[in-house]
Image (cartoon, rainbow, N blue to C red):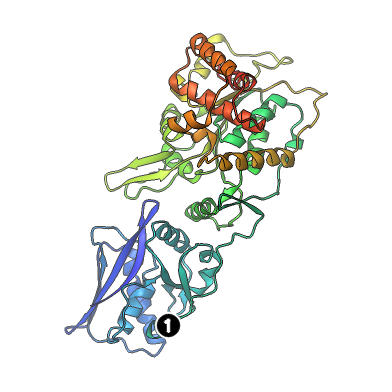
């Protein structure tokens, strides 16, 4: 019996699969066992054709492949090459058990790229389970971004056979783990950024309070809701926030590429955080992920390390809004089904946009609101207090006037955010200010005596919950960082309190 290694998905993570083979005497047959999907069982025909097309005789034996562990459901065409190699090398006395082999076979023996290879191998690398692998040569530009793995690119089945027969002389294909964008290094960790602003804050005229809140939200990854009349610039600000978000580490860029593949997109490896805009008619399964047999990732999981944007917030179903509370608090999403239980990381910046009333004219000085008090109350009651308690910044947009002028550009705002990012990393923070835990709040959110008095007064006057107190401290920490202040001063805390829901 000989064995090669491959992998398959279980949720968002890859699981190692041992491809075992036996060729025994008996009536000629070809069978695959181990909960294989249709794509894997069809590989029998691809393997047969590839062997016969390259002048290899198909052995007249009873061929059995076992994909272990047998209780794990497997899918994908990446098992083709490993099966063909096990047949061809069955009589060879060579060690194979440490090799990972990935590749779909063409009928002529060519090794084809599989779009799922990148997230599979990245997941294995993050788990430190893979060190060398044979992969399609055309996949090398993407795979070479993954560090600490030796990749051997092959174009055909014959090349793979030759490589395994001469392992001691095999040389890994050239690879580079450098992302190739502007970067800076803090405490040995590289962070990449991009000065490309497809949508600029210069286009937003006026709305100085909202732009200041957007700057704070981006710098500390704080959840924010914009409330204002139709056309006042809520969606404009939200779409521009993506381009001024903090720089990304190598691991964050690689994880983003994995999410892009899972979202059926070509990975770009750009240090631009993703933005998932969700429509209010979206189903719960599409937002959070799901599926009756295999739990697939949803919009919340795809927004990891990026932005999750809900426009027309009160029009979302009550179940979706209430279910959003868990990932907003725990930074992960759990999907439980009869056949699987999956947990996805979901650390995102939530942006919500809403009108002040059903008709949208409540805050407009030039238009008359057509809603009665009951309609307005029912509209606002769609957002529960526990949900709103997880929002760091609440912004009421100003009316648009003819005298409004542009102020800060995206380039200027991004420069401030990069400076804050460097500051937080230099003081030893791992995550963003919005994600600080209780111990980190005590360590990093240091208030001077005046700020402590203000916080105590606000806690008593506004009956702030423990969660609200911590959120005020974390927002104040970000404001102090923008002010390059080690301590949180009274003015920083007062500004943080001004963004609390009234």
287 left or right of 51?
right
Quadrant of the drawing holding the C terminus = top right
Quadrant of the drawing holding the N terminus = bottom left
Q: Please tell me which residue is depicted at 61% across the width and 46% down the height of the picture.
A: 247
Furthest-right residue in view? 403
Q: Please tell me which residue is depicted at 33% across the width and 62% down the height of the picture.
A: 16
Question: Pointer 1: residues within 10 angstroms few (<14), some, or many (20+)?
Answer: some
Element type at mark 1:
helix
Q: Position of residue 267 (x, y in %)?
A: 55, 57
Q: Position of residue 369 (x, y in %)?
A: 65, 14
Q: Position of residue 30 (x, y in %)?
A: 25, 77
Furthest-front residue in view? 449
* In-front residue for pair 281/386: 386
Q: Is residue 187 visible?
A: yes
Q: Is residue 158 visible?
A: no
Residue 220 vertical placement versus 50 (above, below): above
Q: Please tell me which residue is depicted at 50% across the width and 14% down the height of the picture.
A: 459
Q: Quadrant of residue 359?
A: top right
Q: Quadrant of residue 15?
A: bottom left
Q: Position of residue 326 (x, y in %)?
A: 41, 32
Residue 463 vertical placement versus 88 (above, below): above
Residue 40 vertical placement versus 267 (above, below): below
The residue labelled by disc 1 is 163
* In-front residue for pair 498/71: 498
Residue 362 vertical placement versus 94 (above, below): above
Furthest-left residue in view? 26
Q: Please tell me which residue is depicted at 72% across the width and 20% down the height of the picture.
A: 399
* In-front residue for pair 11/442: 442
């Amino acid at each position: 019996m000989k064995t090669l290694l491959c992998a398959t998905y279980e949720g968002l993570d890859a699981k190692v699969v041992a491809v075992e083979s036996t060729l025994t005497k008996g009536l000629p047959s070809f069978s695959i066992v181990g909960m294989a999907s249709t794509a894997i069982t069809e590989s029998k025909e691809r393997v047969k054709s590839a062997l016969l097309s390259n002048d290899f005789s198909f052995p007249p034996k009873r061929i059995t492949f076992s994909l272990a562990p047998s209780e794990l459901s497997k899918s994908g065409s990446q098992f083709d090459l490993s099966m063909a190699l096990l047949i061809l090398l069955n009589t060879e006395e060579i060690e194979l058990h440490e090799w990972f082999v990935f590749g779909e076979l063409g009928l002529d023996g060519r090794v084809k790229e599989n779009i799922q290879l990148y997230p599979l191998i990245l997941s294995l690398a993050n788990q430190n389970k893979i060190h060398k692998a044979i992969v399609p040569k055309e996949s090398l530009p993407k795979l070479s971004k993954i560090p600490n793995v030796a990749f051997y690119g092959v174009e055909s089945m014959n090349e793979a056979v030759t490589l395994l027969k001469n392992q001691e002389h095999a040389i890994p294909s050239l690879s580079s783990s450098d992302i190739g964008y502007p970067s800076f290094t803090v405490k040995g960790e590289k962070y990449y950024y991009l000065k490309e602003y497809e949508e600029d804050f210069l286009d937003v005229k006026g709305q100085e309070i909202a732009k200041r809140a957007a700057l704070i939200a981006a710098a500390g990854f704080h959840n924010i809701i914009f409330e204002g009349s139709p056309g006042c610039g809520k969606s404009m600000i939200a779409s521009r926030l993506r381009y001024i978000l903090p720089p990304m580490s190598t691991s964050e860029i690689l994880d983003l590429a994995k999410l892009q593949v899972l979202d059926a997109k070509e990975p770009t490896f750009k240090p631009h955080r993703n933005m998932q805009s969700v429509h209010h008619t979206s189903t719960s399964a599409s937002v959070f992920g799901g599926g009756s047999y295999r739990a697939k990732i949803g919009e919340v999981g795809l927004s990891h390390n990026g932005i999750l944007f809900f426009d027309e917030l009160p029009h979302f179903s009550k179940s979706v809004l209430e279910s959003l509370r868990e990932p907003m608090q725990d930074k992960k999403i759990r999907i439980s089904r009869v056949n699987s239980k999956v947990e996805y990381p979901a650390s995102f910046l939530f942006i919500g946009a809403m009108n002040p009333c059903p008709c949208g004219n409540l805050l407009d000085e030039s238009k008359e609101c057509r809603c009665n008090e009951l309609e307005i109350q029912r509209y606002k009651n769609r957002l529960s207090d526990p949900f709103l308690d997880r929002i760091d910044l609440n912004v009421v947009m100003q009316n648009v006037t003819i005298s409004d002028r542009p102020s800060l550009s995206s380039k200027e705002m991004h420069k401030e955010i990069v400076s804050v990012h460097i500051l937080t990393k230099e003081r030893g923070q791992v995550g963003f200010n919005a994600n600080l835990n209780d111990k980190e709040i005590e360590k990093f959110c240091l208030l001077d005596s005046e700020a402590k008095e203000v916080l105590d007064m606000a806690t008593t006057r506004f009956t702030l919950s423990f969660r609200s107190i911590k959120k005020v401290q974390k927002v104040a920490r970000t404001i102090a960082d923008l002010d390059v202040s080690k301590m949180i001063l009274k003015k920083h805390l007062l500004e943080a309190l001004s963004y609390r829901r009234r």
